[in-house]
Image (cartoon, rainbow, N blue to C red):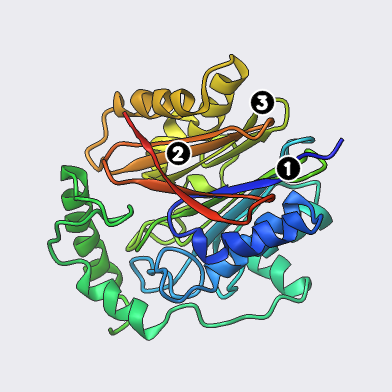
Amino acid sequence: MSRVPIIIGSERSEAGLAEGARLLSSGATALDAVEAALRRCEDNLEDHFIGTGGLPNARGEVELDASLMVGSTRAFAAVGAIKGYANPISVARAVLENLSQHCLLVGEGAELFAEEHGFERSELLTDTARELFVAALAPSKQSVEGENTPALPGDDLYRTSARELVRRLVPHDGPWGTVNVIALDEAGEMVVGVSTSGYPWKYPGRVGDSAIAGAGNYCDLRYGGAACTGRGELSMRVLGARSVVDRLAKGEDPTAACQEMLREAATLPDIFRSELRTLCLTADGRHGAAAGQSGATYNVIRGDSLELEVLPRALI
């Protein structure tokens, strides 16, 4: 029996969510829909935390992370710290389909794989991102890797540490955050996708939760899928996405499952603490999301209406 497809996403996923919903409504798979949605987001030059135009690391080089997980099989594939390729979500899909003996490729190996599979190299550091790279190191009231939310003490310390790192590594002259998309297709398959350029001014080679199964991305069709944005190091320490799905497995409401994971993460000591958010979708189409600061939202499009709904995230 076919079901009404649905696709949900984090803030700024609207750049690609409509395309994913259109594909789902025409009978496409959740995998196709998630990849297409995230490619649109990666190509959005006004978004400086994903794809082309993403803010660079401390050397002034853009490094991207992306992952996909399939709910029915829990097959997972990711690339981390990949440079020179504009659509890491598509490279991750190629790993999923053509290199099933591995789940994660990073750095030079991910780039070699992309080249072997015909992906074209491109310049990821735009003039705007280069300017922001320098200007955004100045003291600010906004979070470092959030959704234009107020800065927390950890954001200020991160900026101070980043300035020291940038000076040491000599960088080039010179609406934000990771994007999550979760889709449920009419055949009942679910896929979670995540793509990001990660923390700006990060140490070269840093890979965040977006490329880690169980941390930034997890999907189990029996219960649902979840993904995270924001302070990836915290999500890795609590296995944030897996934690949400585990709570769904116990019968918790989707919103409550998201809130409880964030509450657990909030108990961990972290001098660089900043915003962490999560969202989830269940196998029967229910969804929820949570954040630590007010004003946070997430996006939903159902296949029977194709209308974008912007919903508030619950607070912890």
Location of residue 281 in the rendering, given as x and y in whole percent from the top left corner: 59, 36
Q: Amino acid at mark 1?
A: Val
Residue at 79 percent of width and 35 percent of height: 73
The reply to whether discs 1 and 2 touch (Cβ–Cβ < 8 Å) is no
Residue 145 visible to the viewer? yes
Name the foreground residue: 79 vs 17. 17
Residue at 83 percent of width and 40 percent of height: 2
Mark 1 surroundings: few (<14), some (14-19) or many (≥20) residues within 10 A: some
- Name the residue tied to disc 2: 278
Could you tell which of marks 1 and 3 lies nearer the N-terminus?
Answer: 1
| 71 lies above or below 116 | above
Residue at 71 percent of width and 45 percent of height: 5
- Name the residue tied to disc 3: 223
Could you tell which of marks 1 and 2 lies nearer the N-terminus?
Answer: 1
Please give left or right for residue 292 compared with residue 237 in the image: left
Could you tell which of marks 3 and 2 lies nearer the N-terminus?
Answer: 3
Residue 88 visible to the viewer? no
Q: Residue 123 bears which disc, if any?
A: none
| 187 lies above or below 118 | above
Mark 2 surroundings: few (<14), some (14-19) or many (≥20) residues within 10 A: many
Locate the C terminus and report the quarter of the image it occupies. Answer: top left
Of all residues, the one furthest to the right in this rendering is: 1
- Name the residue tied to disc 1: 4
Q: Secondary structure at mark 2?
A: strand
Please give left or right for residue 165 compared with residue 242 in the image: left
Q: Amino acid at mark 2?
A: Thr
- Foreground tag (1 vs 3): 1
Q: Secondary structure at mark 1?
A: loop
Location of residue 31 in the rendering, given as x and y in whole percent from the top left corner: 74, 52
Q: Amino acid at mark 3?
A: Tyr
